[in-house]
Image: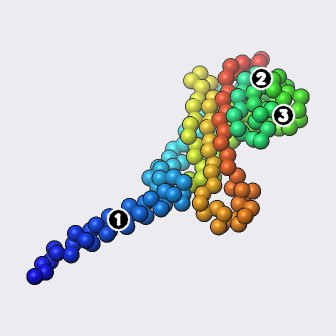
Amino acid sequence: MKTFLSGKPKIIASLILGMALTYCGATFLLNDFPQNIIARVNQRERLLAEVERHKTVWDDRRIAHYRVAVQNRGYTSLWVTCNSAVLEVNDNSVVSAQGAGEDSEECIDVYSDLTVQGVFDLAISYIDRDDPIRVKIFEIRYDDALGFINHLGVRVQPTFFDPFLYGDDYLSVVQPVFFEIDIADLEIIE
């Protein structure tokens, strides 16, 4: 004789199995755990406010002329030659660069993104890219004394869907990126 509960264990087991398979499938297709993507969505506004607050502190100091050591690991395809330098910056423009690739015009373009203002702009642009599936800001640290970003780590990776969304040329649309930028030894020049 069938009772009200006789078919329930099979239904419950099927539901649990279905949810587990959906979770595993989403993890595979999105290259990340769904709860991490949700956390990044929730974290976005907090990170943006934090970076904007530090940028305001930096701007309020009105430091226009300074010398700083930068380390770049993977920011562009030129990272092998433009990976480290001591930059002299005046009014947010690189005046001189001493170090790897210092004579290269291409490196000066890379270094212009690695000024204090440039790193703030990079952080804001990656946080503001409303793309929590692909963009992962995995670390931002600030200088205790002056408030500028002294470490920025970013990873952007294509998902399983990108070849279907953008075709064979998807890597030109969704470029995989992994970089870390460190700024140290900031010296204010009067």
> What's the residue at 83%, 38% (across, down)?
109
Tell me whether circle 3 and circle 1 mark residues in contact (CB < 8 Å).
no
Q: Earlier in the sequence, mark 3 or mark 2?
A: 2
Three-letter amino acid code of the residue under disc 1: Leu
Q: CA distance from mark 2 to mark 1?
A: 57 Å
Which of these two is toward me, 75 or 26? Answer: 26
- Badge 1 is on which residue? 17
Q: CA distance from mark 3 to mark 2?
A: 12 Å
Which of these two is toward me, 164 or 156? Answer: 164
Tell me whether circle 2 and circle 1 mark residues in contact (CB < 8 Å).
no
Based on the displayed image, in which of its 4 quarters is residue 58 positioned? top right
Q: As drawn, which residue projects farthest toward the bottom?
A: 1
The disc label shown at residue 1, or none? none
Q: Assign a secondary structure to mark 2.
A: strand
- Badge 2 is on which residue? 86
Q: Assign a secondary structure to mark 3.
A: helix
Q: Assign a secondary structure to mark 1.
A: helix
Q: As drawn, which residue projects farthest toward the front?
A: 1
Q: CA distance from mark 3 to mark 1?
A: 55 Å
> What's the residue at 28%, 66% (across, down)?
13
Q: Is residue 121 left or right of residue 1?
A: right
Where residue 81 appears, as percent x and y from the top left, is 80, 32
Tell me if residue 53 comes above or below residue 41 in the rendering.
Answer: above
- Badge 3 is on which residue? 108
Local crowd at mark 2 within 10 Å, few (<14), some, or many (≥20)? many
Three-letter amino acid code of the residue under disc 2: Val
Q: Earlier in the sequence, mark 3 or mark 1?
A: 1
Tell me if residue 19 comes above or below residue 105 in the rendering.
Answer: below
Local crowd at mark 3 within 10 Å, few (<14), some, or many (≥20)? many
